[in-house]
Amino acid sequence: MRIVDRIRRWLSESPDLLEDAGGIGETRDLPREVMRREQHEADRFLSEGAKSFDRKKFRTVYGILAAASAAILIGVLLTAVAALPRYGVENERMDEVADYYIDHALEDTGAVNIVSGMILDYRAFDTLGESFVLFTALNCVLILLRRDEPGEEGEDDYYDLTHDNILRKAGLVMVPSVILFGFYVMLNGHLSPGGGFSGGAVVGAGLILTAAAFGNAVSARIVTEKTFRILSGTALGFYCLAKSYSFYTGANGIESVVPLGTPGSIFSAGLILPLDIAVGIVVSLTMYGIYRMFRKGSLT
Amino acid sequence: MRNLVYNYEEAVAVVLFGIGFVTLLFHRNLIKKIIGMNIMDTGVFLFLASMGYVKGGSAPIYAENADFYVNPVPAGLVLTGIVVSVSVTAIMLSLAVRLHQRYGTLNLDEIYRIAREKINER
Amino acid sequence: MVFFKIVLLLLLIVCAVSAAFSKRLLASVIIFMAYSLIMSITWILLEAPDLAITEAAVGAGVSGILFLMTLKKIKRTGNEEKEEKDENR
């Protein structure tokens, strides 16, 4: 019951969620003494690193060693390259895994695009980890770049480009086409080049352009903090559930209920299309969120 | 040495890696260091992708008129790598912004010096 | 085709060197974005169109924007004359 209550509080954006857990909520207003001690620690760490670094002799030794190590590294790598099989000619048929993917991807996964079938079906676990890497990166940026004092509202005006006529007029044309192209790339991941990552990045770039061209009010209306939480949580959760299901059926030899469909049509390739959409949502929201953190210091 | 000419693509990838490495080692500015790191990343990606290239092969998308395809495995790996590299870049940049807020500069030597001064003040 | 590829690879090296050693930070960020675009053309020549789209959107788009935002934030908070010296390193 406690968990349900917590989730409800999280969704309703209550700020004191983590206060009892001693988490992020508390660090906002640390006592001044603690903060000073931590900064002192950081200073001490840096200056201890500098002690040997500032000596003139150390500098010359560092320079020589660094140049030597770079030269040796490049030399060794170039020797290794010279021993490799010839580029483009002898690479063929030297990889059993790739041969298997090329021969069986269509019947196994139903995806016309082999790369897409590979990263979202054969190696889907990898892609799940990657989505979580992105999500964790967003969280790190969120912790690092939060505004310390709430009074710095004026900072936003400095980045305001909404008075720029060229940007506004170009944005009217560019924003819909960029976002539409992003969705096209995202939804056609199993038929043509593209997929969740590239489509999500394009949609994220479109959202960034919206925020830059039309200002805060418009972009905050499109993506609020609540949609942020709900969408990214749902997408990651859906990915986990869908992949757990397909791993379970695959490991036990059960026929999956998701049909593969005819290759080449848009509703085909089983779970790849919904997974593409989930990954695309996570990627686009993450790109946009990182931009917001850099620009304003808060997600919305 | 002749092989190096045949494997020109991989050789260029190694050279890019070296340029990034030198930038990482010799520049004092943190943003330059981050750019160097990104160049190293792309060097590694170029190396991986050119290992998978087969002369005359077509892109790994099923088509009627394709005889054989290039290796799809490096493409998948590099796709993962590109996305991870952008998240690492974001974290490094936000750390740099934090350092700048505290010390007012991005030059590593200056940061060391200011930290020392702050220690001595106490 | 091979000739085009070699020209692109040479351009890559030139861009990498000048991004690493250009005097001003803004210039080196912009050169880095151009580097990413050349890289995405190279991906197409290597028959990896998925990578080309991703590199163009992520390398030239999003991470370039992040670098520019960082530069802007730094200009805003730092004091000006120190920044000039910093940039010339």
Image (cartoon, rainbow, N blue to C red):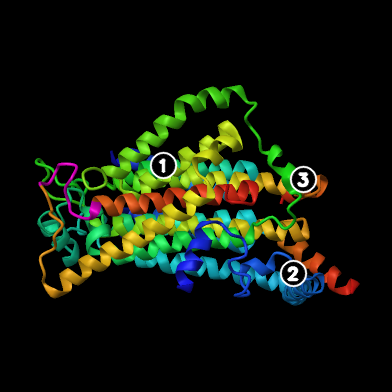
Q: Which of A29 and A12 is in front in this view?
A: A12
Q: How far apart are marks 2 and 1 (CA)?
A: 39 Å
Q: Which of C83 and A201 is in front in this view?
A: A201
From the image, tell me which residue sits under label 1.
A202
Task: Give the structural element (helix, strand or loop) at label 1.
Answer: helix
| Same-subunit check for callouts 3 and 2 | no
Q: Can the viewer see residue C45 in this picture?
A: no
Residue C84: numbered disc: 3
From the image, tell me which residue sits under label 2.
A30
Q: Is residue A162 above or below residue B54?
A: above
Label 2: how many residues lie within 10 Å, few (<14), some (14-19) or many (20+)? few
Which residue is pictured at 22% across the width and 46% down the height? Answer: B59
Please state which amino acid type lies under the numbered disc 1: Val
Residue pushed farthest front? Answer: A1
Which residue is pictured at 46% across the width and 71% down the height? Answer: A3
Q: In this view, does A155 lie above or below A100?
A: above
Which numbered disc, 2 or 1, marks the residue that appears first in the sequence? 2
Q: How far apart are marks 1 and 3 (CA)?
A: 35 Å
Label 3: how many residues lie within 10 Å, few (<14), some (14-19) or many (20+)? few
Chain to which mark 1 belongs: A
Residue A269 falls within the magenta-colored stretch: yes
Which secondary structure is most common in the magenta stretch?
Answer: loop
Q: Which of marks 3 and 2 is in front?
A: 2
Residue C19 falls within the magenta-colored stretch: no
Instruction: Tell me which segment is drawn in magenta.
Output: A262-272
Evaluate if marks 3 and 2 touch, with contact meaning CB atoms under 8 Å apart: no
Position of the N terminus of chain C, as image quadrant, is top left
**Whole-percent x, y for residue B117 in the image:** 86, 69
